[in-house]
Image (spheres, rainbow, N blue to C red):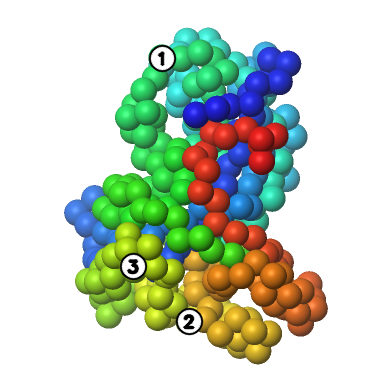
Amino acid sequence: MSLSNRVGSVEVAAPAKINLGLEILGCRDDGYHEIATILQAIDLVDEVRLHPGDRIRTLHRFPGIPDEENLAIRALLMLRDRFGSHQSAVLELRKAIPAAAGLGGASADAAAALLAARDFWGLEVGDAELAVLARELGSDVPFFLRGGTALASGRGDNLDPLPSPGLSVIVVTPHVAIARKTATLYAALRPSDFSDGSRVAAQADRLRAGLRPDPALLTNSFERPLYALRPELADLVATMRACGAPHVALSGAGPSHFALFPDPAEAGSVATRLQTALEDKALVIATRERSVPVGTGILDR
Ligand code: C5P
C-alpha cells in the first residue's frame, strides 16, 4: 500500500461504491439483516488528508454535521483510543461523493481516515485489527479498507474479493433526502422483499469466470420500499431509459441509480443527454470502476 506523504501530511483517496446486485436474506438476531451483495469501487473519490494539529478535528466544519457525528472523525477517535495515546490530527475532507446517496461516501471516508491515521501516527496496527474497528463503525466500512470488487455477506462485512469486471458507469443521484435513510429503508422491508441470495451468487460466478455483470441480476431488495417511499423516482428511471440506459439499477438503499456500459465513450454521451434531460433534479456522473487498492495516493492517479 502506498500513501502519499507531503510535508508532514498523509492523503488517501476514498472511492465510492455501487452494488452490482443486493439481496436481503432476512433478519438476524443482532438487529441487523443478513445480506448478499457485490460491492464495486468506482472512480469517484473523496480526498482525505491528515495534517498536524492540536487535537482531532475537521479543517472545514461541514454545515449541519458536528464533528462528533462525522464518521471519519469517529474513526480517528476510535483508532487513537484503542491503539494510540494522545495523538491528534486535523482532517481535511474534499468531498466529491454525494452524501447519503447509496454510494458509501461516509463509510469510504471513515476507512480512508483509519488507513491514513495508522500511517500518520506510525501505529503498529495490523489489517485484521483495523478491520475490527471498521466493522464497528459501519457494516460497509471494512470493504473500503481495500476497495476493488468484492462479494459481501453477513451484515455486509464478510468479504470475498472478486476480479474486476472492467466497467464504465453512469451514476445518477437525485436530490431526494430521506431522514435516517439506511435504517429507515431496512425497517420498511417486508418478508416478501427477502430472497435467497442466488442472483448475487450467480453474478459473482459470472465475474469469477471473467464475464460482464448480467443486467438481469442487478436487482436490489430496497427497490420496493424505496419506490413506495418516493414514487417520483419512477420518473428518474424512465428518463434514464429514454436517454439510452436500458438497464437501470439501484445502488445501496438509494437514491442513486446507475447504468453500466462496456464503452466509456457511450457512457459519456448518455451522461450528457441525461444531465440535459434532468437539469438540476439530479447529479449525473460518468465514471468507471476503480480496481486499484484503497490507499494509493491521490497524486498517483
Ligand atoms: O452498519 P450501519 O451503521 O451502516 O447500519 C445502519 C443501520 O442499518 C443499522 O442500525 C441497521 O438498522 C441497518 N442495517 C441492517 N442490516 C445490515 C446493515 C445495516 O439492518 N446488514
Identity of the residue drawn at 38% across and 63% down:
210
The three-letter code of the residue at mark 3 reads Arg
Query: Badge 2: few (under 14), some or many (20 or more) residues near its Cα, within 10 Å?
Result: few
Q: Quadrant of residue 23?
A: bottom left
Identity of the residue drawn at 61% across and 39% down:
13
Identity of the residue drawn at 61% across and 52% down:
43
Q: How far from the left and from the top, in percent, is residue 258? A: 56, 70
In the displayed structure, 128 sits above or below 188; it is: above
3D distance between C-alphas at marks 3 and 1? 38 Å
3D distance between C-alphas at marks 2 and 3? 31 Å
In the displayed structure, 148 sits above or below 48; it is: below
The three-letter code of the residue at mark 1 reads Glu
Q: Are marks 2 and 1 in contact (CB under 8 Å)?
A: no
Identity of the residue drawn at 45% across and 26% down:
78
Query: Badge 1: few (under 14), some or many (20 or more) residues near its Cα, within 10 Å?
Result: few
Lower sequence index among marks 3 and 1 = 1
Q: Nearer the viewer, mark 3 or mark 1?
A: 3
Label of residue 124 in the image? 1
The three-letter code of the residue at mark 2 reads Ala
Q: Is residue 283 visible?
A: yes
> Dot 1 lies on which element?
loop
Q: How far from the left and from the top, in percent, is residue 202? A: 28, 70
Lower sequence index among marks 2 and 1 = 1
Q: Is residue 223 left or right of residue 292?
A: left
Q: How far from the left and from the top, in percent, is residue 39? A: 43, 56
Residue occupied by mark 2: 228
Residue occupied by mark 3: 206
> Dot 3 lies on which element?
helix
